[in-house]
Image (spheres, helix red, strand yellow):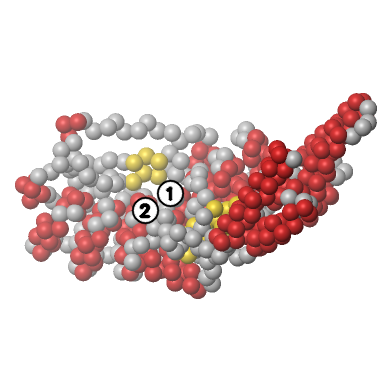
């Protein structure tokens, strides 16, 4: 019912080929708990006794049968048995081939040897009726996936549970394998037997940006529904409270009015799961898109252009009020009234117009509202303004590549076994050069990335280092000048 696989690795204790250890994965199929009303939980198997944790010695290797020799990677013993006439395609008592055992344990040389002896690459076996490529994908062995596909393994075939390799890689969070499969031509929206896409699996199972972000970059559909539950990827993210992927889907334009088989929208599912953060985010987006009309100002507060203008104007009025009210010659009652009005102005703008993007804009406005008005320091201010503008508007060193170059780069990295997520950007689909990094605000990779500065609303990179340092230099001079004038004058 739920997914289970055979023994995964054998690093530290002897293992009889007739013994069978299962890795229980109760959440493997989200359909089963929903359809059967259970949580699918099972007790984990007890740990092996301490006496069994012994590494086989050289004499033990000589007595290994071919299954154990394959699991432990004893190449000489394998050659000895095969050369004595053993059929490489023989299935063991668990209906598993030798190629399966080599694939799940990432034995590259042994797979090459088996292939040279005529091993069937797409042989189905095991409890899940899956191929060696499925086993390697589940374990995240990218070099093995590349090798098996070079021998003709088909990543589109489905295992006994109806999942192809892209679905397995997505639900187990193996982003590099997902990238390689798509680069080799696998459909990013390929369906399993339940009508679920790779993006649905990633939304349901993986609580991180990748591989969902990678799939969205490759154009995965965000509003496709599965066959039975009629859930979209956003529904699945709400089911498990996956706020990280839910935000990615919302930013990608996920349909907020999509209804599943139970007549529930993503907002209904999030509310049932008691996820207040996600509920608030969805409600804000519904108001922004004009789907809900809770107040008469929604047509203005949902307009991004108006919200941005209010955000820019707000500091000028607010700072003026803070400075004017205490210094004016009006009565205390009038000052209190003006202070109350200023407070209401701040609360109204905060509630209706401000959001998390405020902190990318406000620092820049404070600079404009504070320093650029000081005409006394004309020369320093002009230099400050010039360098500020160049830091703000210049290309910091964005790394660019077209789709053909991206696909070519993924294939080269994967086939040379150098597709590492620490060096590969899953959003831009490029290998990041030395000292480069992906900026989550600009959504681009930047050469010689230092940081994204909210004060200039831009990245500090290879092309903007000099302007940013100059901006800080003149800003420091101006601050010292102001402090001198305040204290000594």
Q: Residue furthest left?
A: 59
Residue 100 lies, in percent from the top left, at 28, 55
Residue 284 visible here: no
Q: Which residue is mark 1?
A: 172
Residue at 46 percent of width and 67 percent of height: 183
Residue 402, quarter of picture = bottom right
Residue 194 lies, in percent from the top left, at 52, 52
Residue at 74 percent of width and 54 percent of height: 377
Disc 2 crowd rating (10 Å Cα; few below 14, some 14-19, many 20+) is: many
Which label belongs to residue 140? 2
Identify which residue, 236 or 398, lies in the foreground: 398
In-image side of 100 versus 359 (left or right): left
Position of the N terminus by quadrant? top left
Residue 382 visible here: yes
Relative height, residue 153 to residue 173 (above, below)? below
Marks 2 and 1, how far apart at CA: 8 Å
SS assignment at label 2: loop
In-image side of 202 versus 319 (left or right): left
In-image side of 269 versus 325 (left or right): left
Relative height, residue 453 to residue 219 (above, below)? above
Residue 397 lies, in percent from the top left, at 55, 65
Disc 1 crowd rating (10 Å Cα; few below 14, some 14-19, many 20+) is: some
Q: Earlier in the sequence, mark 2 or mark 1?
A: 2
Whether pointer 2 and pointer 1 mark residues with C-beta atoms closer than 8 Å, the reply is yes
């Amino acid at each position: 019912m739920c997914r289970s696989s055979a023994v995964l690795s054998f690093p530290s204790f002897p293992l009889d080929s007739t013994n069978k250890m299962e890795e229980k994965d109760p959440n493997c199929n989200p359909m089963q708990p929903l359809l059967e009303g259970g949580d699918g939980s099972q007790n984990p198997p007890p740990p092996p006794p301490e006496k069994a944790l012994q590494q086989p010695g050289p004499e033990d290797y000589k007595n290994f049968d071919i299954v154990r020799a394959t699991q432990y990677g004893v190449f000489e013993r394998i050659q000895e048995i095969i050369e004595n006439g053993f059929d490489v395609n023989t299935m063991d008592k668990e209906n598993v081939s030798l190629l399966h055992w080599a694939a799940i344990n990432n034995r590259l040389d042994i797979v090459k040897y088996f292939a040279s002896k005529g091993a069937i690459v797409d042989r189905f076996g095991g409890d899940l009726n899956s191929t060696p490529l499925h086993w390697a994908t589940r374990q995240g062995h990218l070099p093995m996936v590349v090798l098996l596909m070079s021998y003709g393994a088909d990543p589109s075939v489905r295992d006994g549970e109806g999942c192809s390799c892209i679905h397995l890689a997505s639900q187990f969070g193996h982003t590099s394998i997902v990238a390689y499969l798509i680069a080799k031509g696998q459909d990013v929206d390929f369906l399993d037997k339940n009508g679920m896409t790779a993006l649905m699996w990633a939304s349901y199972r993986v609580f991180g940006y990748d591989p969902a972000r990678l799939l969205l970059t490759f154009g995965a559909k965000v509003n496709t529904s599965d066959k039975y539950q009629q859930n979209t990827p956003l529904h699945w993210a709400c089911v498990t409270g996956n706020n990280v992927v839910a935000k990615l889907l919302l930013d990608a334009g996920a349909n907020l009015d999509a209804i599943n088989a139970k007549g529930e929208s993503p907002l209904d599912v999030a509310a049932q799961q008691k996820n207040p953060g996600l509920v608030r985010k969805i409600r804000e987006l519904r108001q922004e898109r004009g789907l809900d009309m809770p107040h008469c100002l929604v047509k203005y507060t949902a307009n991004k252009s108006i919200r941005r203008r209010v955000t820019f104007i707000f500091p000028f009025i607010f700072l003026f009020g803070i400075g004017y009210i205490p210094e004016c010659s009006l009565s205390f009652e009038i000052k209190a009234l003006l202070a109350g009005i200023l407070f209401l102005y701040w609360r109204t703008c905060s509630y209706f117009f401000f959001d998390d993007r405020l902190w990318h804009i406000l620092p820049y406005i404070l600079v404009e509202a504070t320093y650029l008005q000081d005409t006394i320091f004309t020369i320093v201010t002009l230099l400050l303004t010039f360098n500020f503008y160049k830091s703000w508007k210049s290309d910091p060193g964005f790394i660019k590549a077209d789709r053909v170059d991206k696909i070519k780069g993924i294939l080269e990295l994967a086939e040379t076994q150098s597709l590492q997520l620490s060096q590969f950007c899953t959003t831009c689909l490029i290998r990041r050069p030395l000292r480069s990094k992906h900026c989550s605000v600009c959504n681009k990779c930047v050469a010689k990335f230092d940081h994204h500065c909210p004060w200039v609303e831009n990245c500090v990179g290879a092309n903007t280092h000099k302007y940013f340092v100059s901006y800080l230099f003149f800003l420091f001079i101006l601050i010292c000048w102001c402090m001198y004038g305040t204290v000594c004058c």
